[in-house]
Image (cartoon, rainbow, N blue to C red):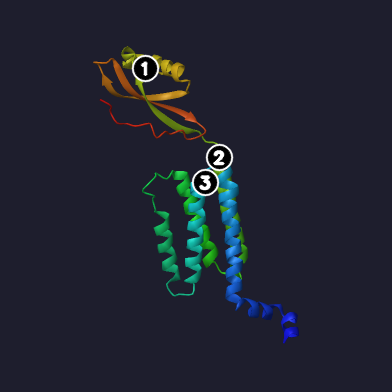
Amino acid sequence: MNEMILDKPELATTVFFGGSRLAEFGFRFALNALVIFLLVRIIYYPRHRNKDFLFSFFLFNIINFIICYLLSSATIKIGFAFGLFAIFSIIRYRSVSVPIREMAYLLTSVTIGILNALSSLDTGLPELLISNGVLLLLTFVLDRKVTLPHENSQMVIYEKIELIKPENRNQLIEDLKLRTGLPIHRIEIGRIDLMRDSAKIRIFYLSQESQSSSFDSDGDDD
């Protein structure tokens, strides 16, 4: 019996792993773990350095993978997969605002888990490997190599009230550039306080990174 097991690897796999389904689960889980590790630890973290989201990305991916794989033999697997994908893709944390870039990474993590859990290995293994590679490559290129400028804005309190006149708009922009050091290309004049000779002005400028601040608010201070 022992010789028979050693001479037939597939029989040894059946004996030691309890059947091919467990071996398939191990392969899928290893592939999924490798892909999510490359996405989160190699692509995301070196650029954004946010450890809080690492936990969420890994956990959402693993939860989706396990649930989808365990229910993959059920007749409702297709509808369930789409429902699960929709639920996790619209989740918002109530304690903190999730940036749109992190939401995109979260959606990608969910997609990878479902993809690796439900794709057929009998006829679709090359397509599965290529799909994972394409997702990683696109994420890397779009996050690091695409250098389109980002329009940022800030609210400032401006005291030279005479420059808010329409005919002085260019002079106003140049003065704001000089005093802030920012490449301002347009402005929006908000509340004007003639009693204090000041005005709230939102300035807009281009940069390679998003520089929004939690202190920036449109609220009016009395």
Q: Which mark is residue 51?
A: 3
Query: Whole-Å distance between the Cαs marked 2 and 3?
Result: 24 Å
Residue 82 image offset from top left, x and y in percent = 43, 63
State whether residue 117 is above or below residue 8: above
Q: Which mark is residue 146?
A: 2
115 or 221, nearer to the observer = 221
Q: Quadrant of residue 167?
A: top left
Q: Quadrant of the C terminus?
A: top left
Residue lying furthest top = 162
Q: Could you tell which of marks 1 and 2 lies nearer the N-terminus?
A: 2
State whether residue 46 is above or below residue 172: below
Q: Which mark is residue 86?
A: none
Identify the residue under disc 1.
Answer: 169
Residue lying furthest left = 195
Tell me the residue at 47%/66% (across/down).
Answer: 67
200 or 174, nearer to the observer = 200
Q: Could you tell which of marks 2 and 3 lies nearer the N-terminus?
A: 3
Residue 220 image offset from top left, x and y in percent = 28, 28
Left or right? Give the position of 154 relative to 137: left
Residue 134 image offset from top left, x and y in percent = 58, 54
Which mark is in front, 2 or 3? 3
Left or right? Give the position of 215 relative to 206: left
Q: Residues within 10 Å of mark 1 (few under 14, many from 20)?
A: some
